[in-house]
Image: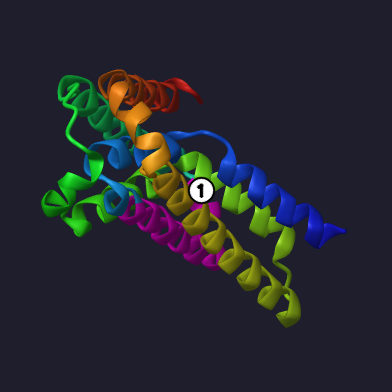
Amino acid sequence: MEALSLAILGILIVVSPGADFVLVLKNSINKGRMAGIWTALGVSLAICFHIGYSLLGISYLISQNEWLFSVVRYAGSAYLIYLGLKGIFTANASLETIETNKADIRAIQFLAQGFLCNALNPKTMLFFLSIFSQVMTPDANEAHAALVYGLYMIMLHGLWFSAVAVFLTSNTLQKHVLRMKKRLNQACGVGLVAFGALLAIKS
């Protein structure tokens, strides 16, 4: 039952709308399917980062150090606000098809955006800290279980956000997405700025 509860919790955390979802949405509607998928892979890579330091206990040290935690929090906030403002001011209503942007895609750019968006989120850090504090014990078998759960979370993030990118750029939805492209860009920008501002002001 505990394993099932953790599995369900992981799904709920991944599918809950947040900054990662907004970023994948923004990159998918602007630069196409592969941009969205690279962003999703960047998010998954950040989960590897969170799992690594959680297993090593570094996240606990950060959460107990107010100054260091504030640095992480404000860095994440500033990055989300930057991405949001950029989306707002560059929003356009061009009706070019999404897939025509393939030539402009720089994989490392979207990979880095997805990674930084998730890695600089202290809420994600505290989530993994709380989860692994329940899963980890001195027992070697339990440590193995924690690693398996970490791999499960990486897979969930990669599959979910890649599916979002594929769904948004499908032929069925593309006409509707393009019709609302400018408003979607602006909404995504406002969403990222809001997430960044809340991250900065929330204790």
Q: Identify whether 125 is placed above or below 190.
A: below
Residue furthest left in the image = 104
Taking the image as shown, residue 77 lies to the left or right of residue 128, namely left
Q: Identify whether 91 is placed above or below 169.
A: above
| Amino acid identity at mark 1 | Met
Q: Which residue is mark 1?
A: 125
Residue 108: quarter of image: bottom left
Residue 27 part of the magenta-drawn span: no
Q: Residue at x 57, y 68 (%)?
A: 151
Secondary-structure class at tag 1: helix
Residue 67 can be seen in this image: no
Residue furthest right in the image = 1
Residue 167: quarter of image: top left
Q: Quadrant of the N terminus?
A: bottom right
Task: Residue 154 in the image: state x and y as whole percent.
Answer: 52, 62
Task: Residue 188 in the image: state x and y as whole percent.
Answer: 35, 26
How crowded is the residue under tag 1: few (<14 C-alpha within 10 Å), some, or many (20+)? many
Q: Is most of the magenta stretch helix, strand or loop?
A: helix
Residue 40 part of the magenta-drawn span: yes
Q: Residue at x 30, y 18 (%)?
A: 183
Q: Which residues are magenta?
A: 37-62
Task: Residue 126 in the image: state x and y as whole percent.
Answer: 56, 45
